[in-house]
Image (spheres, helix red, strand yellow):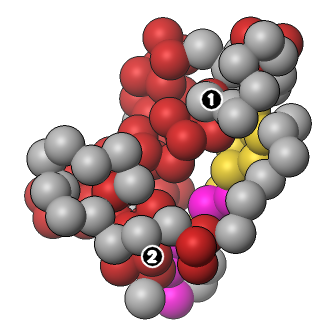
Amino acid sequence: MRSQLGEIFDVIERLRSDPELGISDSWREAAFVIAMREALANAVYSRQPARWLLKKVYVQYTCEPDNSLSILIRDEGDGFDSSEVPIPKDMGQDISRGIYLIDLLHG
């Protein structure tokens, strides 16, 4: 996808509509949408503002036989160490909540 916030909704909807994902209960769907929205938003933003519009974001997913789902989101930025992201103080406002929620769901 192009590195634009407006692309996030379409990507999530395409993934949600894939029957292989097996998103059938409301908790799993809500967790999926939150994690994807946060991860894609993190991928769109870059520490290099002049270049962020030129980046691409890549999404790859694998549905496993045990009903688990693995999602890889990669961008063309420099990357960061997620262990250095602080635990959010306010889940409704803190911009670091996405990394925390993804780690929590992965956990």
Label 2–label 1 contact, CB within 8 A: no
Rendering coords of residue 8 (x, y %): 49, 25
- Membership of 10 in magenta stretch: no
Between residue 74 and residue 84, name the one nearer to us.
Answer: 84
Residue 15 coordinates in the image, percent (x, y): 50, 40
Kindly identify which residue carries mark 2: 103
**Label 2, residues with CA under 10 Å away: few <14, some 14-19, many ≥20:** few
Q: Residue at x 69, y 32 (%)?
A: 46
Give residue 52's position: percent from left, percent from top. 74, 19
In the image, residue 36 above or below residue 90: above
Q: Determine if residue 16 is in view.
A: no
The residue that disc 1 covers is: 44
- Say whether residue 14 is left or right of residue 77: left
The range drawn in magenta is 66-72
Which residue occupies 48% across, 11% down? Answer: 6
- Position of the N terminus, as image quadrant, is top right
Q: Quadrant of residue 3?
A: top right
Q: Give how far apart the Cα atoms at labels 2 and 1 are.
A: 19 Å
Compared with residue 107, is residue 10 higher up or lower down, i.e. above or below?
above
- Name which quarter of the figure residue 70 lies in: bottom right
Note whether 93 is above or below 5 in the view shown.
Answer: below
What's the residue at 70%, 35% (across, down)? 47
97 vs 57, left or right, is: left
Crowd around label 1: few <14 · some 14–19 · many ≥20 (10 Å): many
Q: Amino acid at mark 2?
A: Asp
Residue 33 left/right relative to 60: left
Question: Which SS class for mark 2?
Answer: helix
Q: Is residue 37 visible?
A: yes
14 to the left or right of 34: right
